[in-house]
Image (cartoon, coloured by chain):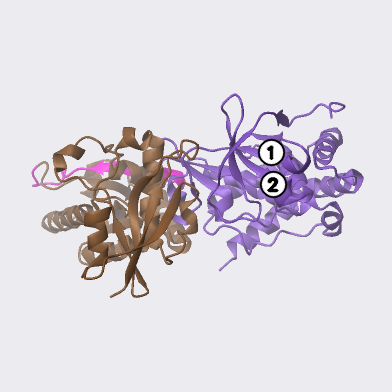
Amino acid sequence: MDLIVGQIERVEGLVDFERVPVMTASEPTYAMDSSGRKWIRKSVLHTVHEPLLAEALGWLLARALGVRTPDGAIGGEGDGLSWLSLRVDGVTHWHPSSIHFIKNAKELGRMLVLDVVILNEDRHEGNILLQPNPDQYNLVAWAIDTGGALIGFPESFAQAGMALPSIAKLARGIPVELVADEARATALQATTFSPYLLRRFVEEACQIAGEPKDGILLEALSARMKGAPDLTEKYLQSIEQRP
Amino acid sequence: MSARFRIVHFVPDPFAGSRIAIAAIVNVNGRWELARARSLPGVACAGGLRAYSTMQMILERLSATERFDRLPFSIGPQAVLGEEIEVPTGVSDPAAWVEAMVLPRLDDPDDQKDTKPRGPHRETLGYQVLQHYGVGEIVHRHLKTEGIPGVAAKAANDISHYVSGKSEVLLMEPVIATRANLSQDLTSISETFLAWRKLLELSPAKRHPRFIAYVMGPVAGFTEAQSVLRTAADMIVDIDNRSERTRFIEEIRRIGSTGGGSQTSFLH
């Protein structure tokens, strides 16, 4: 596990609390570690390994692309192996009526690029959290949960080529006029990631999820990173044209 | 009559497990109504300003409730529904009964003094939103009646925001439909617009004035704004609607680009 420089923290000594009261197949629970950090825990018992790969690789790329996403970590082992996302305190889900008060709205452009690159079609209202900072007129938007992205399935991801994610489930009301410039800049940034960095991300995520097909994944991801500006432009258009 | 209810609990911290009853969904013969707690915790009791604000957002979104068995998805993980409970037979207004008998209430309104944060001013919020959409530089704030020939100072409330062009001036008021005192806000805006209209009739402006209210928040608030401001405003813009918002922002840019200055004297 320590052969590569790991970016994703391993957390020991987790204690489970209640289930998070949201409807999702991953059955997340609240969990706390010995230092008192509060996490949302998704066990592979419920998610199997592909979403774990998508979470880990999605999180590494999110951080590198500057997407505002909570700290991520790995906890447990065997059936208890889990993806951990640091709990964001005091949140609601996305709602279009809140967009005027989101102070980091432009950053949602970064999130869209991430979703384009990892082929994430699961950016519904529940996967954008709105946090008062400090009140409801000053909100911070957080992007969470890349577990549903196709990047967790290396062969399917490679077969998808340069396909765009469907926007059928995408949260409504994302203000394209506010996020487009940031999205384009982030897409350009994606083209500059070195092969070494991408390989490191892919290897680490595959190692965590026990996925052997890291070569296929790296090749497909590299192509999408290079093609991010074109893909992003088309993705923005599709969002803008949505009725 | 058959009526049941489920309490909506705000969960400030799921790790501590505490729950605060903030409302109830009441099912009366298959139709639901919302009962709201008359007493809500203040900032400290809710767990701080962030938790208090989250609770307020949840309360706003409860108005979109459409089902008895689950909360609107946008409410997120910090509110949960309690068990289903029957309203006693013989109760004629189940929602009012739940509000009065079940949900928290304080008999003495003084007990809740100073527990609510004041929150930002309507004008400030509106200006933040205009900045958000990149027209903060074009929009000026606080248009005063001083400078209108023959008009006494403070003859009417300030206009919150204005954009002056070569031949037109946009006189604008934000409406925050989620504010508890929405009705008062709308009445005040109506009075302000009507007063300015009268003043500008008495002392005609060089530039054609247009009175615009721009509304953000639930549809019900927009509908109320349309009703209250129908005679006072020339235009009521729903800026939650993307196409209306785009047209509104473009109009501000268009008028602003023709130039007109930021002094009250531009009117005359």
The percent coordinates of residue A20 (x first, y second) are 55, 47
The percent coordinates of residue A161 (x first, y second) are 84, 57
Magenta stretch secondary structure, dominant: loop
Q: Is residue B70 above or below residue A54?
A: below
Magenta residues span B130-152
Q: How many marks?
A: 2
Residue reaching furthest front?
A: B89
Displayed quadrant of residue B250: bottom left
Whether pointer 2 and pointer 1 mark residues with C-beta atoms closer than 8 Å, the reply is yes
Mark sitting earlier along the chain (2/1):
1
The residue sitting at 84% across, 51% down in the picture is: A154
Along the viewing direction, whichever of A95 and B189 lies nearer the viewer: A95
If the image is split into quadrants, where does the C terminus of chain A sit?
bottom right
Along the viewing direction, whichever of B246 and A220 lies nearer the viewer: A220
Which amino acid, mark 2?
A: Leu
The percent coordinates of residue B198 (x first, y second) are 13, 58
Q: Which residue is mark 2?
A: A114
In reply to whether residue B139 is colored magenta, the answer given is yes
The residue sitting at 56% across, 27% down in the picture is: A36
In reply to whether residue B209 is colored magenta, the answer given is no
Give the chain coloured purple. A
Along the viewing direction, whichever of B24 and B188 lies nearer the viewer: B24
Q: Is residue B234 visible?
A: no
Q: Is residue A15 above or below residue A102?
A: above
Give the chain coloured brown. B
Crowd tier of the residue under label 2, counting other residues whose Cα lies within 10 Å: few below 14, some 14–19, many 20 or above = many
The percent coordinates of residue A91 (x first, y second) are 48, 43
Q: Which residue is mark 1?
A: A65
**B227 to the left or right of A240:** left
For the residue labelled by badge 1, is the local secondary structure a helix, a strand or a loop? helix
**B227 to the left or right of B252:** left
